[in-house]
Image (tube, rainbow, N blue to C red):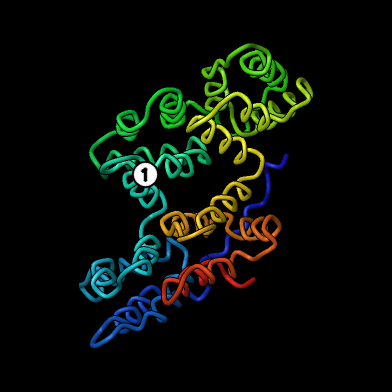
Amino acid sequence: MSWYYTPKPTVVPAEEFDASADANALRKAMKGFGTDEQAIIDILCARSNAQRQEISEAFKRELGRDLIADLKSELGGKFEDVILALMLPPEEYLCKQLHKAMDGIGTDEKALIEIIAPQTNDQIKAIVDCYEGKYNRPLAEHICSETSGSFRRLLTMIIVGARDPQGTVDPELAVEQAKQLYDAGEGKLGTDEEVFYKILAHASFDQLEIVFEEYKSLSGRTIEQALKAELSGELYDALSAIVECVQMAPHFFAKRLHKAMDGVGTDDATLIRIIVSRSEIDLQNIKDEYEQMYNKTLLSAVKDETSGDYKRGLCALIGNA
């Protein structure tokens, strides 16, 4: 199954790792007049998240200082955003991003989709637990207050852990589900949105892959074509994101990265979020996909769009290989 692509990270744990040595080197890079940003990049962009947590602990234990507070006081701009993102445990970082997407006036629905759509039940549970602990408010409740209609119901279903566990597969049911999707869309006048979001929020990714194959056999069209013809707005965006993540998650993220850099201006928040959050998962796969799709390397695209320490930090995470 294509869902079983082998995830290849660009950031892996450093082999010769010494948290104390790294903590002292970081202190030296920030002590006195001026800051050695390159030293910070060389250390923090070349360690796994777990190793960064150890460095943070060593910094507190041996130097009596808060590493994040020191980084905040020494760095600025987008470079600071990258480094601080690297210092948070993955689920805490995604919680912060979800909160940011809903905080204040307006909601960044695309960020909600990008963060929530690719997650398995276990990953969602870690994010949900972290969110309530951090913001003293259930994530589902916050999302309900910021979204509406079928889009809200879809996101809420995913967040409450409605999806079947990974590996849950029932080929006979897949035939039935494909028919239900057909009958709810192409097979009738109008669209029964509920059938679409219920199946796509409940079935495991493994099951959905079979459902999509069955759909094509049944209707002669791909599920993507059906969604495009039947749905629109945020619900369409969210469901097509799930479809892409089922079939090939790196393709979905490569598209998001390209969009973040296409045209006038750069969507730095999306650029940072994807590069940081996928660097220890499948950023190498995303790079390969990006080059295939756009005939340009992700590294050269990022270099064209960014500058200074911000550019150097992102490029260190992307890697040259």
- Measured from the top left, where is residue 99 in percent x and y? 32, 44
- Measured from the top left, where is residue 260 in percent x and y? 50, 55
Task: Give 50 or 109, whichever is nearer the viewer.
Answer: 109
Q: Does residue 65 lie above or below 125 as drawn?
A: below
Q: What type is the residue that disc 1 sits on?
A: Leu
Q: Which residue lies furthest to the left in this view?
A: 64
Q: Which image quarter holds the C terminus?
A: bottom right
- Measured from the top left, where is residue 217 in percent x and y? 79, 24
112 left or right of 187 in image:
left
Q: Residue furthest bottom?
A: 33
Which residue, given by chain and number where applicable, does mark 1 sit on? 98
Task: Give 236 or 54, whichever is nearer the viewer.
Answer: 236
- Measured from the top left, where is residue 49 in percent x and y? 43, 61
244 left or right of 97 in image:
right
Task: Give 138 or 17, whichever is nearer the viewer.
Answer: 138
Q: Does residue 81 lie above or below 176 as drawn?
A: below
Q: Which residue is drawn at 68% across and 48% down?
A: 5
Q: Which residue is drawn at 25% across and 43% down?
A: 104
